Amino acid sequence: MKFILILGIFYVGYIESITNKKCDMDVNLRIDCHPGWFANDKECKSRKCCWNVVQNNYPGCFFPDDTHFYHISEINAFNMKNTFYIYHAKLNDGLSNHANINQITLNISVVNENILRWQIKDRWNKRWEIDIFNDNLNKLYEKGKTFNDFNGEIDLNANLIKLNVTKWDMNIFNSFEPLIYADQFIQFSIKINYNDWRMYGLGENYNLLQLNQKNKFIRRNLWNHDDVPMANNNLYGSHPFIIIAVKNRFFGYFLQNSNEIEIDISSNLITFRILGGIVDVFIFSPSASLTDVLHQYFSIIGKPMIPPIWSLNYHLSRYGYGNDYAFTKVIERNDQKGIKIKTYWLDIDYMNQKRDFTLSEKFKRLPMIIKKLHMMKKKIVIILDPGIYVDENYFPYVKGLEYQIFIKNSTNDNIIGKVWPGNVVYPDFTHTNVTKWWRSMINTFQTVVPFDGLWIDMNELANFVDGSIYGCTINRYDNPQYIPHIMGHKLNYRTICMSSKYYKGIEYNIHNLYAYYEAKTTFKVMTEQSKLKPFILTRSSFSGIGKYSALWSGDNQSKWDDLRRSIP
């Protein structure tokens, strides 16, 4: 393992780069200087950036190739287990404002012999960080691996924010300037030093399996959203994991961040824009086996659950049975035709007025039907949505008020949205009391409807109004300066206000994690309930959710292309 410190005797500040900017650069190395809407020549030049419109969606407004905003001010190397190289950087003179973070700390650490970790944080102030994988990471760090165990080469520039990692003769990481680190806007880039490479990952998206296309500029967003999957849109789940394939070898990255993430992809560059949190990148070592890279990823996020055997058979799900008689007829017809359906699924039409933990009069025979299904060794899965109807005579709502487990708005009242039953509140699955409430609801209802599995839906969080039925207050979370290219052109489009309060934080930071916390809580309750493996299916997702739940791909148009895209 070699650690190389590239020393220099000068740095080129941003002010100098304005007068000596270099705009004649490879289009594949352009970093968007105006990623928002309606870029033009005048606005671009006011940002001291280059303006040159070309084809294939490449940025017309881009940073000069010598642009950088930070310079290294201090480097510390610690010779210990999980050796950390910690280096501090300061914002260049003349760039301080209320948004930019003036001093940052960059950490390089060895997670194990195959995984390197690169973090960039505010030097003096605590920022939002994901903690859901801390147990896994602590176990990895306990093994005390060093840079010698990693057995690679790290080149660190002494003046600029540049990190270059090589292992087994493969360049697997090359940070590319400029780095921007503001409170609600972080941007960094990774240069891929190969011409013939393929990129996969960044779920959930409805596009071709290979993300990069030669001589084309592509933009993707990770922001969980309830809508019919369409190409280039942000969808139900966010998985900031990337696999890079170069010939017959693979390596990868995992960006541990739950905020909105926008990713620009060109022939030689991957640029990340994050609206909060920190930069926390895990760099996975190269291997001839893709499985090896996946195992490195799973060592951090957790291994996927092994589902119950019965769930691997044929299932039938539909919306709109209308009543239990129609449902029974479908079961009988399948049996008569020899169609071996193992598991039947029920959507919200089994509920009374579409309210969770209720049974419609039209399905009053459902308990008896399920008993017969069980005698035939068949199973039943029912749907649950997180939205709890607001009614003082509705037991789940009353009990939730008692436990104080609903998400709050900025004035500490329960935030009220609207979904299928009408006005609803939403459980805070980060709350310390929520497991008791969720356990009570599930166990009580199972005595009425003895279901075998749960389908947790609408957990993006989905909302039929933007923010709440009363809208959102004017604040920096619901109205950030940068609006990414997402559905609805605002963060609270068809979800709750970004300023909404959880036990562990705010919606702005937790939004993409909602389904993860719900699945984890549901898994805990159903595991307590039975010695058998639980079956849970979720629509929304984040990295690591497979430890607790299976995942479905949401709605589609049932066309040939939908089927084709579902098979890698």
Image (tube, helix red, strand yellow):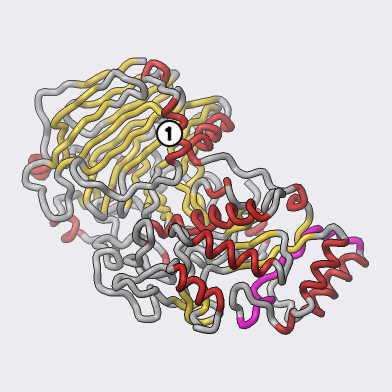
Q: Is residue 97 magenta?
A: no
Displayed quadrant of residue 40: bottom left
Identify which residue, 456 or 565, lies in the foreground: 456
User: Looking at the image, which residue is at 15% across and 35% down?
Assistant: 71
**Of the pair 300 and 407, the residue shown nearer to us:** 407
Q: Position of residue 256 (x, y in %)?
A: 40, 44
Q: Give, as a single range, the part of the protein colored magenta.
A: 338-353
| Mark 1 neighbour density, 10 Å: few (under 14) some (14–19) many (20 or more) | few
Q: Relative to 195, say whether 351 is above or below.
A: below
Horizontally, residue 492 falls left or right of residue 422, namely left
For numbered disc 1, what is the local secondary structure? Answer: helix
Q: Residue at x 82, y 67 (%)?
A: 371
Is-magenta flag for residue 350?
yes
What amino acid type is highlighted by mark number 1? Asn
Q: Position of residue 480 (x, y in %)?
A: 26, 63
Q: Nearer the viewer, residue 541 or 231?
A: 541
- At 54% from the left and 49% from the top, the residue drawn is 545
**Residue at the far front in the pictured view:** 402
Please say if 174 is above or below 526: above
Residue 367 x/y as whole percent: 77, 72
In the visual, does 209 lie left or right of 359?
A: left
Question: In the rendered view, does 469 fall on the left or right side of 345?
Answer: left
Read off the residue under disc 1.
138
State which quarter of the image contains the N terminus. top left
Total numbered labels placed on residues in the image? 1
Image position, residue 304 (x, y; %)? 60, 43
